[in-house]
Amino acid sequence: MPISITTEEILETIRMVEAENLDIRTITMGISLRDCAHSDLKVTSRKIYDKVTQTAENLLKVGEQIEAEYGIPIINKRISVTPIAIVAEACEAENYVDLAISLDKAAKEVGVNFIGGFSALVHKGMTKGDEKLIYSLPQSLAQTERVCASVNVATTKAGINMDAVKIMGRIIKETAELTKEENGLGCAKLVVFCNVPEDNPFMAGAFHGIGEPEAVINVGVSGPGVILNVVKNNPDITFGVLASRIKETAFKITRMGELVGKQAARRLGLPFGIVDLSLAPTPAIGDSVADILEAMGLERCGTHGTTAALAMLNDAVKKGGAMASSYVGGLSGAFIPVSEDAGMIRAVEDGALDINKLEAMTCVCSVGLDMIAVPGDTSAATLSAIIADEAAIGMINKKTTAVRIIPVPGKQIGEMVIFGGLLGRAPIMPVNKFSSESFINRGGRIPAPIHALNN
């Protein structure tokens, strides 16, 4: 059934777009590559390139048509694919770098800025294909521009694969070193997950899950500026009333996102998947999740009360979005990436926000320690321990958590690193000076919590 949109809603959406930075952050086409498997790596590479370019050849054009017709900015058109570790397992090759290069060329050919799915799912153990992909990550991310990667190391049902966690600390260090001329930018395209969703449209963690159809359209909506305006315009109301106002606004944002997603799916001849409700900030002024929290009455994001404010915001957005669409998925929360949020950057610079507080905030939001820049001499063991802490939060709380951290080569605490574009800029944040190496070296698997036994 088509979505019925009133004239009043159209005018309100126009106002949100023009004055409050409302946009569709991404239309992401998920593509299954399971039929591209072959023992010859070159054949697999060719099949991947051909399938991606053929399936997504009209993605950019359709997105631009919808933008023009509806007047709603669609910032990114992207692609996610089947985790490459699964597709490549049959290949008789030592590494999968050539597959990453093929993905990169395909993404460039169809005009998307990112393609996600150079990924592995290793929460309970690693196959030979998983190991090859993981050890291919540094070179693959260094030699490509558009390829994004993710590794799922934990789930509530399986526990935490600490062997994989240990390896990922070293992989992140190596990736940073191989992309040091770009301030470790390769790490900005690599996410380590717990409880990874298989229909996430946002990068860098998007991939096309094995339970998904042949191809699908997923949409990520973003409206921090719209929610900020609601909070600013209601400075004296109680939290219960404020939550209701946020829910009403999230409802409208989600309806707009579903309308655009279904239009894109229809024109591309594909099924519509999900709307991701996440509030995704940008470095632009007025498009910040931190600003929303401060508008609730906090002097700076990170001060006492921040976690409570974020919990209320996240819950209200989910409740409003869930009423607007029957197909909500992905991450659906509030993102708190430091480098991509002007208010978060300000809070770090003012000494109000540190990694410990960010970790606490991830207990109540999506998705985790995101776009955190740390000193380049941070040890691999410390990076692994940070991943383990986030995975534990996700495992125990039955939610998605993740780490996208950048040990910037040659940079020290207090310096600023510029990534540019949506990735913004990041102050180098301190990590705990005490070692976690003996803990990480234990290896094995941290068992799943008792509430995993809920069948």
Image (spheres, rainbow, N blue to C red):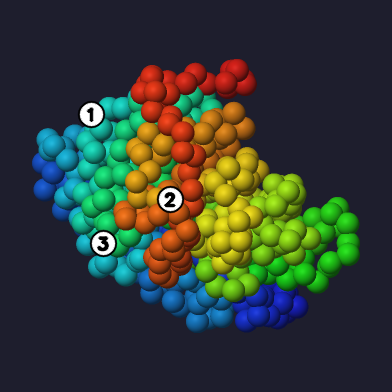
Query: Which quadrant of the figure has residue 288?
Result: bottom right
Instruction: Identify the residue at horizontal 70%, vertical 67% (top origin).
Output: 228
Instruction: Identify the residue at horizontal 86%, vertical 53% (top origin).
Output: 240
Q: Is residue 75 above or below residue 49?
A: below
Query: Looking at numbered disc 2 in the image, what kind of residue is underneath it?
Result: Val
Q: Secondary structure at mark 1?
A: helix
- Number of numbered discs overlaid on the protein picture: 3
Q: From the top left corner, tell me how far across and down residue 395 is, in percent.
A: 55, 30
Which residue reaches farthest right? 237
Q: Which residue is the site of mark 2?
A: 374
Query: Looking at numbered disc 3 in the image, what kind of residue is underneath it?
Result: Glu
- The answer to which of marks 3 and 2 sits earlier in the sequence is 3
Instruction: Identify the residue at horizontal 36%, vertical 23% (top origin).
Output: 441
Q: Nearer the viewer, residue 67 or 140?
A: 140
Tell me whether the residue at label 2 lies in contact with that at label 1, contact meaning CB atoms closer than 8 angstroms.
no
Tell me whether the residue at label 3 lies in contact with that at label 2, contact meaning CB atoms closer than 8 angstroms.
no
- Judge the density around disc 3: few (<14), some (14-19), many (≥20) Cα neighbours within 10 Å: few
Horizontal side of 81 relative to 333 (left or right) equals: left
Q: From the top left corner, tell me how far across and down residue 422 is, in percent.
A: 45, 67
Q: Secondary structure at mark 3?
A: helix
Alpha-carbon span between mark 3 and mark 2: 16 Å
Q: Is residue 260 above or below residue 207?
A: below
Q: Nearer the viewer, residue 234 or 415?
A: 415
Q: From the top left corner, tell me how far across and down residue 116 is, in percent.
A: 36, 52
Alpha-carbon span between mark 1 and mark 3: 32 Å
Q: Which residue is the site of mark 1?
A: 128
- The answer to which of marks 1 and 3 sits earlier in the sequence is 1
Alpha-carbon span between mark 2 and mark 1: 31 Å
Q: Which residue is the site of mark 3?
A: 181
Horizontal side of 112 relative to 451 (left or right) equals: left
